[in-house]
Each structure stands twice: as structure tokens, then as C-alpha cells.
Image (tube, rainbow, N blue to C red):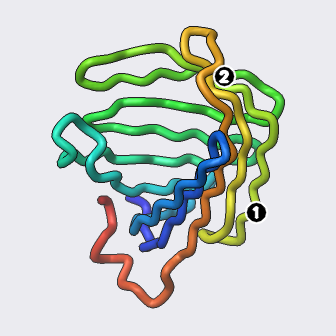
Amino acid sequence: MPDYTPASITLTSLQDGAETVQSYQGQVFNSGSGIFLKYEEQGQGPTGEEVTRVTVLITPGELKLIRHGSVESSQSFQEGRRLPGYYRAAYTSFNLSTQTHSLTLNLDGLSGTARWKYDLYVYDELAGQFDISLHIQEEVGHDTQSIRGN
């Protein structure tokens, strides 16, 4: 089992001139081939009380975002590529794809920043253009034994 380290996560999304900033407490670990980041989003379902578990895998040149819970989705990002994904929720399901224009990874150990700009397509129709910044700050001085395997 990997050793998870607590981390503070800030996700900034810019779409159509509107900026949304969300902060989370999560866990991060180095898998050898990349960095795994795990956190939970609250209120993503019909009642606003559901929890969605988010896993982010960052490897050289690629970022993958997976959600499990009231929302199930997968999105992959590689600069210059259009990659398939999906979205499933209680009352809707659709295929999507992402056309990534830029992906910049600036990581130092378990901390750093990922930034990517992409077009989101739903059923091959442009659904939005996004500029995302993900900041990960490893929290030092915590007992990693207590959260191992979560």
C-alpha cells in the first residue's frame, strides 16, 4: 500500500470569463510512474449532500481526472490531442472528449502546479472552453501512517 501524504488542493477554473476557485483537503502519493491525488467533492448530486471521490493521476505529459460517487466521469488531457471520456450521473449519461491546447506541469516532489487549457466536447459538439489550474501543497509534519491505504 502506498504512503499517502495530506495535501491542500486549490482548483481554479476559468470559463467564459467567470472564475471559480475551490479548495479541498486531500491526499497525495508518488506511484513511481506519476503522482496520485485524491480528494472529495461535496454536493455534486441531486440532493446536494452526495460525495464524489476524485482521483487525479499526473504523469509526464498527461493528466487524468476520474470521479466516482454520485457523479462518474473520466477526462484525460494531453497537449495537442483530443481524448475520449465520459460523464454519468443519476439522470444523464454522455460521451465527451477533451481537446487540450496546453498542459504545463510544474511539480517538485508531491507539491506543485498543473495548468491546462482545453475545449470540452459533448457528442462532438463544443460545450465549453476551460482554463484550469490545480495547485497541490504537500502538508509536512503529518503522520502518514494514520492515513495509509485510504
Image mark count: 2
Residue 128 falls in image quadrant: top right
Q: Name which residue lies at 50% across and 66% down.
A: 9
Q: Is residue 102 left or right of residue 39?
A: right
Q: CA distance from mark 1 to mark 2?
A: 22 Å
SS of the residue under disc 1: strand
Query: In this view of the protein, which residue sits in the foreground, 131 or 102?
Result: 131
Residue 40 falls in image quadrant: bottom left
In the picture, the disc for residue 83 is 2
Q: Name which residue lies at 59% across and 54% down.
A: 19
Mark 2 surroundings within 10 Å by alpha-carbon count, few (fewer than 14), some (14 through 19), many (20 or more):
some
Query: In this view of the protein, which residue sits in the foreground, 25 or 20?
Result: 20
The residue wearing badge 1 is 106
141 relative to 122, above or below: below
Image coordinates for residue 127, horizontal then vertical, percent: 59, 22
Q: Is residue 66 left or right of residue 125?
A: left
Image coordinates for residue 125, horizontal then vertical, percent: 62, 12
